[in-house]
Structure formats: structure tokens, C-alpha cells
Amino acid sequence: LTRDFAEAEYAVQECFVRGLRRFDLHSGDDMKPWLLGILRYFCKVELRPRGKALAPPESDRNEDPASAPELVAPTAAQVTSLCRCDARRVRRLIAELPEEFREPIVLRDIIQLSYRDIARVLGMSTDTLLSQLASARSELRARLRIGKQAAP
Amino acid sequence: MNCSQTEILIHALLDNELDAGHPIDVEAHLSACAACSEELAA
């Protein structure tokens, strides 16, 4: 939501403070989607209008082809390292997605909320979420393919 | 169920988030449609 570590920390602290202050409004369901709703509102309505443009996500410095490990009979440690490299790349591509695609992917594939909870956090119907998530994953897959084709 | 509906519902199927009844519809379409089966495999 912020693409800035310090601002993200501030937003999370503020979210917990507000959550504690308004705990009487919590209905007793799972707390995670409720807190994420507060966090999202704070970032979108209060943090962003302060004028700071979203910074582009940090580039993945480990993608330098010169530093890539050789793909000959990789050891288990090398396989783990390659998986980490791929995971970093996927995370960077997710961070670069437009917000309407990034949010459902982060909430489902990283935070692992249920569709019902994601729809509640994002304020949309589950049918809209389904279609949004499908479009978001298609876009991410297309960007992954482009990245692989561009790689030497 | 058509291909565009299935394309969307494949994600819910993979996430185990399809309502009762829908998995059968999606799987029936997948078994009859090569394009959607490829989409699922991808």
C-alpha cells in the first residue's frame, strides 16, 4: 500500500492504535480482515493525500545475469537459492502491478485471506473479487512470461 | 458454463473457494474443453 518501509511501519502502528481505540466496533469475527480494512483506509485516505507519490518498487539487484548461478546439476542449496530468486522476482512483479490487481493478489496469495474476507476488506462483492483476481493473476502471469522472454 | 465463466472460476477452484455445485460444473466444462484445460495446466 505504501511501497515505503518506514511509512508502512507507521501505518501498521496507527492501524493497531485505531483498532484498539475502536475495539467496541469489532463484531467478534476474525480480526485480521477488520484490521486490514482499517489499514487500507488509513493508507488510502490519510497517508496518500498528504502529497507523497508512491515510489516505484525497489528493483531486484540479485537479477544481474552475471551473478546468476550456473544451471548445471544444481545442489539442493542451489535449488533453494533459485526458488528464493524466483520468489523475489514474483514479489517485485506483484509490487509493480496496478493497485486494483495488486490488492487482491496480496490479500489472497500472500496474506491468504478467504474470498469472503478479501471482498469485505476491499468493499466489493465476491463475484467482482473473483473476476478481479482472475484478471490480476492473468496480468501477473503475462508479466512473468515477458520477464522470462527478456532474460538472456 | 462457457469458457469466460470457467476462466474466472478456475481460480476459485484452485483456491478451494467454489460454492457447492460449482466444482462439478467447472470440472465438467474442463473435461470437455481443451482450451480451458490448458489454461488450468498453465
Image (cartoon, coloured by chain):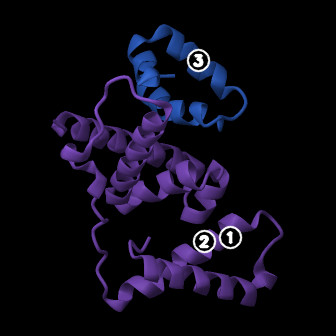
Q: Please tell me which residue lies in front, A26 or A128.
A: A26
- State the CA–CA distance, disc 2 to disc 1: 5 Å
Vertical side of B10 occupied by A86: above or below: below
Which hue is chain B drawn in? blue
Give the crowd class for mark 1: few <14, some 14-19, many >=20 residues within 10 Å.
some
Based on the displayed image, in which of its 4 quarters is residue B17 positioned? top right
Three-letter amino acid code at the position of disc 3: Glu
Indicate the position of residue A48 as horizontal and vertical percent values: 39, 83
Residue A37 circle label: 2
Give the crowd class for mark 3: few <14, some 14-19, many >=20 residues within 10 Å.
some
- Tell me if label 2 and label 1 are in contact, CB under 8 Å: yes
Q: Is residue A136 visible?
A: no
Indicate the position of residue A63 as horizontal and vertical percent values: 26, 49
Q: Please tell me which residue lies in front, A90 or B38.
A: A90
Residue A34 circle label: 1
- Quadrant in which the N terminus of chain A is drawn: bottom left
**Does residue B4 appear left or right of residue A112 in this picture?**
left
